[in-house]
Image (cartoon, coloured by chain):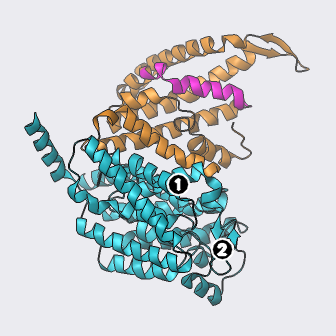
Chain colours: A cyan, B orange
Amino acid sequence: MMKTMETNNQEIKQQTPRVSYKNLVIMSVLLAILLILGAFVYTPYVLLMGAVAIVTSLFIEFVFARVRKMEYGKDIYGAFATPLIFTLLMPPELPLYMVVVGAGFGVFFGKSVFGGLGRNIFNPALVGYLFLLVTFPTQVSQSFIDPVTGQVLQSIGISDFTFVGTSEHLFGILLGQYANTIGSTVMAGVWIVGAILLFLKIADWRIPLTVLLASAGFTVILAKFYPDQFHDAFFSLFLGQLMFAAFFVATDPISGPQTSKGKILFGIGIALITVVIRGLADSAEGVVYAIIIMNAVSPMLEKSLKEEDES
Amino acid sequence: MIEFTTFAQLIVATIFLNNVLLFSFLGLESVTTIEEKPKNALKLSIALLFVLPLVSVISFWIYHNLLLTLNDTGEVVRDLTYLQTFVFVVTITVVVVIFNVLIKKVFPKLYMFIGQSTIQLVANTVVLGVLLINISSVDTLANSFYFSVFAAFGYGLVLMILTFIEKQLQQAPIPKGFKGLPIQLIILSIITLILYGLNV
């Protein structure tokens, strides 16, 4: 009995797809750099949030592996990226128990239940974010902090902008003078760390490129029909979590598609849903919904593309 | 539940926001009977796309002309609405059987493809559920037709997505207790979180 279980485990281990432990470690380090940047802009409390998220998800994964009597071992390298991404998507000064709830829900229902590292259909960080958004809407989506004045804002610093963006605004965004979520406040950091990610080939360049280009394109097109809802296409790229999500969340090699055609379609889909939700729905930010929807669709997308190639 | 002022809103609301499978949790039993075969899901969706508009238009007419009769001033003359569930189930069965016999004679190829799935639909709650939503929140016969077409489309879409995800999960070491229906419900609920998030 034990023997068959062991061989089964080995077979499963061999089949584990799409995971490179080295890349996961580098990714975690890069995300930690972004978190530290966030701590410089806001308060060191941000680091505490990150630590609590990491401890929660490690605890859940470890206990789950214990209960299933499976080896945890090397999978620990994959346990840092998810809570870090989760924390970077949160507004600063979120109460710690909410961090525990969100990270715990995301890791358990987004990852462990699906069979652990490399098996998740949805990005676990986004599952946690979405659950927290539904459970505590005001704290997650309506309590941002202005980094310059320290005021509490109802929405992100430039979300309801009607101005034509100037270079002054651009520098402000790059250096983190407008309120935003922890990860996307310092846009220059997102760019530099994202560029490193692409340079080291941890993330595929196709996804960020298509997401950003296509969302600018869709904004231009939709602005023709709805001039009240859509404004400057260039500046819309810097709003909210779009840039951060395009570089760090959408490029997740596990929950996204594998083929290059699939990746381009995946990016275009994210861009379209994001732009539509931003402009026409009540929600301010749509990129999280967009990535979850495209995660759900991507097995279908891949399969249909593969069948086309075969025939 | 459903308020639509424009046609575009009706499409978006029915296919995505008020998706019958995600929002009303109708037709869940088909999720388990599909057995991870996308082809079965496709057959069921196409069958639903034919049957649902037919049934819903007929039942809408029956409800507003036979079960519930109003006179010119809007007073209720006859109210047999307590019979609606029974009448609708009979309607569904009769329409499905007649539909199957007809396509067997006229389009034998189509019958080969969707014949089995059409019979399955008799026991599917999505048909009865859509009929009940139909009479409670749709005002005209044309709207009931559009509503059922898009409801069938949205149901099929989610069913297809779910089967492909299931197929990918076949190899995964899912815990024993979560295999099968539980993991399907978890996937569905994660997708449903989006709908709730959008309404926040």
**CA gap, disc 1 to disc 2?**
26 Å
The foreground one among B6 and A299 is: A299
- Quadrant of residue A239 in the image? bottom right
Secondary structure beneath dot 2 equals loop
Q: Point out the stretch of residues depicted in magenta.
A: B120-140
Q: Is residue A203 visible?
A: no
Q: Earlier in the sequence, mark 1 or mark 2?
A: 1
The foreground one among B48 and A286 is: A286
- Residue A306 x/y as whole percent: 28, 53
In the picture shown, does residue B66 fall above or below B177?
Answer: above
Residue A157 is labelled as 2
Q: Nearer the viewer, mark 1 or mark 2?
A: 1
Q: Residues within 10 Å of mark 1 (few under 14, many from 20)?
A: few
User: In the rendered structure, which amino acid carries the disc numbered 2?
Assistant: Gly
Q: Residue furthest left?
A: A3
For this view, does B41 lie left or right of residue A131? left
